[in-house]
């Protein structure tokens, strides 16, 4: 049984998640990580993108493929950004009833609750209770690029949760939104010392990393 299956918005997110997971274990667990959504067996990057995006993450988590994945995958990592969380079909408000912006921790909790309710309503309580402990949510506030800032910044910018794509490009240089380039810009997270020092700078990255660690997973 493969250790981790990745359900994410796109191949670039897969790259970041893989490097973080590798950094959390002493051994190289590359062979224990399988991309499930979107599938990366297409040779054309544009073809892969057609099957990605935040809506496809929700769609996958309501599909038979999601249900079947637990037969061969030990843990499913489900990643989604929050930058468009107020759009139709996502519909998670980023502000309180009083109009105050939610903290990253509260926003992450609300997005996770959205997924849990969707899985529960789609598959029923018996299945939900059986697999929920095998799902690890990677909710990136505001976008996964924010998770990479601690690699490149030592000041307050490393804690940013807005305009992260721009800030990342300012330090990491020119790169495209594809697996190869994001593997390169996030590769330092493969080093455990770098990851363990950096992850606490970003609230939603901290939630993800600690949710993996608390499971005491042994490859």
Image (spheres, rainbow, N blue to C red):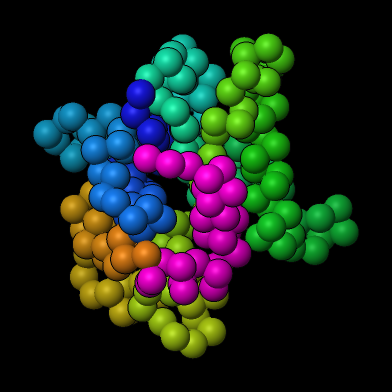
Residue appearing at x 46%, y 68% in the figure:
196
Q: Which of 122 and 5 is in front in this view?
A: 5
* Left or right of 13 on screen, residue 215: right
Q: Nearer the viewer, residue 152 or 25?
A: 25
- Residue 215 in magenta? yes
Above/below status of 213 relative to 65: below
Residue appearing at x 65%, y 50% in the figure:
108
Residue 19: which quarter of the image? bottom left
Residue appearing at x 45%, y 63% in the figure:
147
Give the magenta range: 193-219
Residue appearing at x 26%, y 50% in the figure:
28
Above/below status of 181 relative to 79: below
Where is residue 213 drawn, in percent x and y? Answer: 53, 51
Give the main secondary structure, helix, strand or loop, of the magenta stretch.
helix
Where is residue 10 drawn, in percent x and y? Answer: 34, 42
* Left or right of 180 on screen, residue 204: right
Image quarter (top left, top right, bottom left or bottom right) of the N terminus: top left
Residue 193: which quarter of the image? bottom left
Where is residue 25 drawn, in percent x and y? Answer: 37, 53
Image quarter (top left, top right, bottom left or bottom right) of the C terminus: top left
The answer to whether one can see residue 58 in this image is yes
Above/below status of 149 relative to 39: below
Where is residue 149 drawn, in percent x and y? Answer: 42, 72
Q: Nearer the viewer, residue 90 or 135?
A: 135
- Residue 211 in magenta? yes
Which residue, as the protein is rendered here, is positioned at the far right?
98
The answer to whether one can see residue 141 in this image is no
Count of number-bearing discs: 0
Which residue, as the protein is rendered here, is positioned at the far left?
43
């Amino acid at each position: 049984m493969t250790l981790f299956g990745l359900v994410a918005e796109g191949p670039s997110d897969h790259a970041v998640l893989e490097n973080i997971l590798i950094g959390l274990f002493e051994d190289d667990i590359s062979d224990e990580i399988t991309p499930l959504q979107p599938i990366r067996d297409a040779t054309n990057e544009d073809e892969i993108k057609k099957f990605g995006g935040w809506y496809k993450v929700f769609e996958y988590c309501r599909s038979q493929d999601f249900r079947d994945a637990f037969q061969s995958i030990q843990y499913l990592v489900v990643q989604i950004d929050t930058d468009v969380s107020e759009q139709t079909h996502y519909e998670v408000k980023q502000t309180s009833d009083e109009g105050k912006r939610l903290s990253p921790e509260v926003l992450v909790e609300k997005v996770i609750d959205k997924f849990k309710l969707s899985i529960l309503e789609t598959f029923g309580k018996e299945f939900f209770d059986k697999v929920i402990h095998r799902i690890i949510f990677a909710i990136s506030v505001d976008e996964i690029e924010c998770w990479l800032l601690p690699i490149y910044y030592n000041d307050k910018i490393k804690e940013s949760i807005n305009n992260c794509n721009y800030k990342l490009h300012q330090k990491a240089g020119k790169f495209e939104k594809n697996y190869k380039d994001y593997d390169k810009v996030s590769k330092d997270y493969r080093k455990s010392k770098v990851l363990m020092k950096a992850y606490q700078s970003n609230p939603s990255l901290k939630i993800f990393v600690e949710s993996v660690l608390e499971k005491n997973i042994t490859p």
